[in-house]
Image: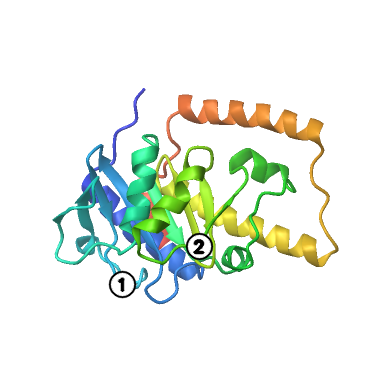
Amino acid sequence: MTEAKPSEGDLRKQLVRFGRWMNRLGFAPGTSGNLSARLDPDRILATPTGCSKYLLHASHMVIVDIDGKQLSGSRCVTSEIDMHLTIYRMRSDVKGVVHAHPPIATAFASSGIALDEPLCSEIVMTLGSVPLAPYATTGSAEVGHTLVPFISDHDAVLMANHGAVAYGATLLDAFMKMETVEHFAKICLITRQLGGGKPLREDAMSELFEARRKYRRNLAICPNLQPEEKDLRSIAST
């Protein structure tokens, strides 16, 4: 059974909710961070520039085409829209993109350290490694260019001296991957404080890669486990 595609109204509300969650987690302080969702192959719904993610409203969202031309919205689209568009162009399976500045993951990015050491089986299964893209000036087209080598084979990327970006089959999927990036960064930080972690053995990694393939196949086959609208409202109000 094919799951119903979320309407534009639904996606506007989801951008508001996930933006607020990012702010509450400390991933998007001030006006930082941005989110977007794919409306159709040619149009992207995105957060506007210069806005607190805690104070967003559904009416604030902006629609652009896949080349970045603004089609509707009373505000200007996020200055980092090129990064989102680069991901959408390269990954037809991606329907949501989240860019944030989770503190510990950003500290790793600012130290020039990727989150690519196989320390935790659950991370390998659900997210995989998180590479580090070279530095580029915030808001420039160069940011998207630095991500290109990593987009096809990864679902999240650290951005040197900047933050992180995660993307997935839905906005919820992208948001959960961003949560996982920060969780993994905490694990990596603590293992370093304890004297260094013990990476998984090669044979264990081979088994995990096979398990990951099955996990992803099951996700593709099973209906998307997107929460009902009432559940999202309940969580967002807490």
Q: Residue at x 52, y 54 (%)?
A: 178
- Residue at position x 72%, y 45% from top? 118
Tell me where residue 114 sits by quadrant: bottom right
Question: Residue 200 placed where, x, y %?
Answer: 79, 42
Quarter of the image for the C terminus: give it.
bottom left
Q: Between marks 1 and 2, how big is the CA–CA gap?
A: 24 Å
Q: Mark 2 is on which residue type?
A: Tyr
**Residue denoted by label 1:** 51
- Residue in the foreground of this view, choosing between 34 and 17: 34
Residue name at image x 53 percent, y 67 percent: 161
Residue closer to the observer: 113 or 176: 113
- Residue 222's place in the image compared with 183, above or below, is above
The answer to whether residue 110 is visible is yes
Q: Tell me what residue is drawn at x 42 percent, y 66 percent.
A: 137
Amino acid on which the number 1 mark rests in the picture = Cys
| Image coords of residue 197 (percent x, y) | 81, 54
Q: Which mark is residue 138?
A: none
> Which residue is label 2 attached to?
135
Q: Quadrant of the N terminus?
A: top left
Query: Mark 1 falls on what kind of element?
Result: loop
At numbered mark 2, what does the secondary structure look like: helix, strand or loop?
A: loop
76 left or right of 213 in image: left
Q: Position of residue 223 (x, y in %)?
A: 43, 30
Question: Is 29 drawn above or below residue 169 in the view shown?
Answer: below
Q: For label 2, count other residues whose C-alpha is less than 10 Å away and answer few (under 14), some (14-19) or many (20+).
A: some
From this viewpoint, is residue 234 visible? no
- Nearer to us of marks 1 and 2 is 2
Point out the residue furthest to the right here.
195
207 relative to 48, above or below: above
Q: According to the image, what is the colour scheme of the structure? A: rainbow
